[in-house]
Image (cartoon, rainbow, N blue to C red):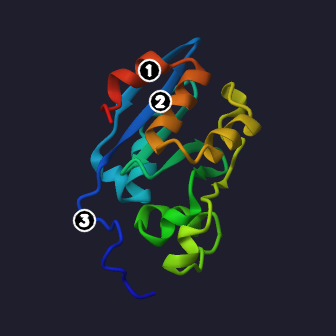
Amino acid sequence: MASNPDRGSSDDAVTGYALGVIQEGTAWRVLRLEDSALTSLHDAARQVRALRIEGASFGLVDVDHEFFVILRPGPSGMRLMLSDATAALDYDLAEDVLDELNEEVPDLTEDELEDTDPWAEGDMAILEDLGLPAGVLEIITSETDLYADEQLQSVAERMGFADEFEQHAPES
């Protein structure tokens, strides 16, 4: 695959944030992950795995407020959800997520991309056992008038850790 000079690769200045979320009993704890999680799925997965405690843990990665990734370690491997499959045309992280999901990168021209609504890929039930039904996550990702950080804020609100989320997610 030829490299697109406009892609959000690890050499480009990608903005956003990566958060680790841990459920400890009925309480939530949110911490900032290293920025390398914004460009490397391997590194994001490593950092989320390092959060392992007795309770549930997962990662939220917002890249350039364009798309987000939810990562959750499980017994059968890393579970993944990508909010916008079309982001794989411009960002290595999104392309890596699609690769892990065995999904093809969309084959769209710039004109086709402008006329195409983004769509989510991956495990929409990734947080269902923690209180976020797959249908609700599907609705959140389909709200294309919201930026990725606003969509993640909605996830945090629905799951009950909005205050903790706001303390660690930078303002838009």
Q: Judge whether 160 appears above or below 82 on screen.
A: above
* Amino acid type shown at disc 1: Arg
Coordinates of residue 158 in the picture (x, y in percent): 61, 23
Coordinates of residue 135 in the picture (x, y in percent): 76, 38
Within the image, what quadrant is residue 115 found in?
A: bottom right
Q: Secondary structure at mark 3?
A: loop
Q: Earlier in the sequence, mark 2 or mark 3?
A: 3
Tell me the tag on residue 12. Answer: 3
Coordinates of residue 28 in the picture (x, y in percent): 50, 18
Residue 80: in sight, yes or no?
Answer: yes
Q: Secondary structure at mark 1?
A: strand
**Marks 3 and 2: in contact by CB < 8 Å?**
no
Give the distance between the C-alpha atoms of the residues marked 3 and 1, in whole angstroms: 30 Å
Tell me the tag on residue 114. Answer: none
Mark 3 neighbour class, 10 Å CA radius: few under 14, some 14 to 19, many 20 or more? few
Q: Earlier in the sequence, mark 2 or mark 1?
A: 2
Mark 2 neighbour class, 10 Å CA radius: few under 14, some 14 to 19, many 20 or more? many
* Amino acid type shown at disc 3: Asp
| Nearer to us in this view, 126 or 121 | 121
Numbered disc in front, either 2 or 3: 3
Within the image, what quadrant is residue 169 found in?
A: top left
Give the distance between the C-alpha atoms of the residues marked 2 and 1, in whole angstroms: 6 Å
**Marks 1 and 2: in contact by CB < 8 Å?**
yes
Residue at 67%, 50% (x, y): give it: 76
Q: Secondary structure at mark 2?
A: strand
Q: Which residue is mark 1?
A: 29
**Marks 1 and 3: in contact by CB < 8 Å?**
no
Q: Which residue is mark 2?
A: 21
| Nearer to us in this view, 120 or 143 | 143
Give the distance between the C-alpha atoms of the residues marked 2 and 3, in whole angstroms: 27 Å
* Amino acid type shown at disc 2: Val
